[in-house]
Image (tube, grey):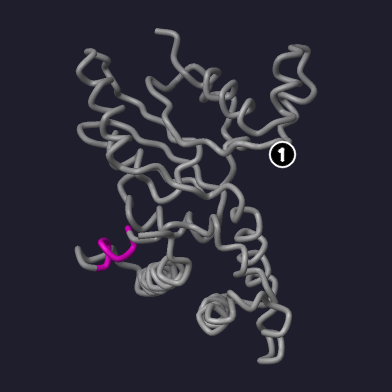
Amino acid sequence: MGFSKKQHLQQNIDALRIAFKLEKEKRQATVGERLLMMQYSGFGGLKFVLNPIANEIDINHWRKTEHDLFPITQELHQLLKENSEDEKQYRRYVDSMKSSVLTAFYTPPQVIDVISATLRESGLNIDKFLEPSAGIGSFVQSFSENQQSVTAYEKDLLTGKILKQLYPESNIRISGFEEISEKEQNSYDVIASNIPFGDTSVFDLSYSRSKDNAKVQAARSIHNYFFLKGADCTSSN
């Protein structure tokens, strides 16, 4: 069975609706709500969600093969508007989606479980775990068993909402990995993630203005930046 854009978007909408509801009611998710939120898959491969949807005639600007996705995309934007304090916040949600459509692809949990199991079987003591690009937290879930401290970064605002509701006991930061403090360097036992890849540069003055040429070069491509920044945050003990 191929990738169903409509199914993935509907699951995303259902998950976001729950996350917004939990925020308003200031409570943790039930088992059923948590299972539904775990169906969230981000907006990678769903570029059409950025198409115009304000008026019914906007469908004329869509590809004919995606016309059936017009109503559900309207539903998504309506949900975002209803849960935004103002137009500015709504635009921030849309801009966040725009930044994620090319990079938000998640790793199968089975792959992650093998990685975490292998590290544990090697005898590695994992007291502090860091996930620099968490998505909905598959790495967090796999590595959080018996962990003392789990920290996760997720830059996408909507995905971050899901992540925060799924793992309220973890230190979830809805911001970019570049915002990690310098005092956290050399402090994590394991850093694991499905990092974003591409030629996108990262705004991190500690790298772009560094005297270390490797850091300057790394800041020019997001995957190299994540690799090197992750290494800086790994404990040498």
Q: Give the quarter of the figure containing the C terminus.
A: top left
* Magenta stretch bounds: 33-38
Residue 68 is situated, as x and y percent measured from the top left of the image, at: 53, 81
Mark 1 sits on what residue?
200
Secondary structure that dominates the magenta span: helix
The foreground one among 88 and 103 is 103
Compared to residue 60, the image places residue 65 above or below, namely above
Q: Is residue 23 visible?
A: no
Compared to residue 84, the image places residue 157 above or below, namely above
Compared to residue 101, the image places residue 200 above or below, namely above
Q: Give the quarter of the figure containing the N terminus.
A: bottom left
Residue 214 is situated, as x and y percent measured from the top left of the image, at: 71, 14
Instruction: Describe the element under mark 1 as helix, strand or loop.
Output: loop
Residue 135 is situated, as x and y percent measured from the top left of the image, at: 45, 48
Amino acid type shown at disc 1 = Thr
Residue at 23% across, 26% down? 117
Question: Position of 226 compared to 58: left or right?
Answer: left
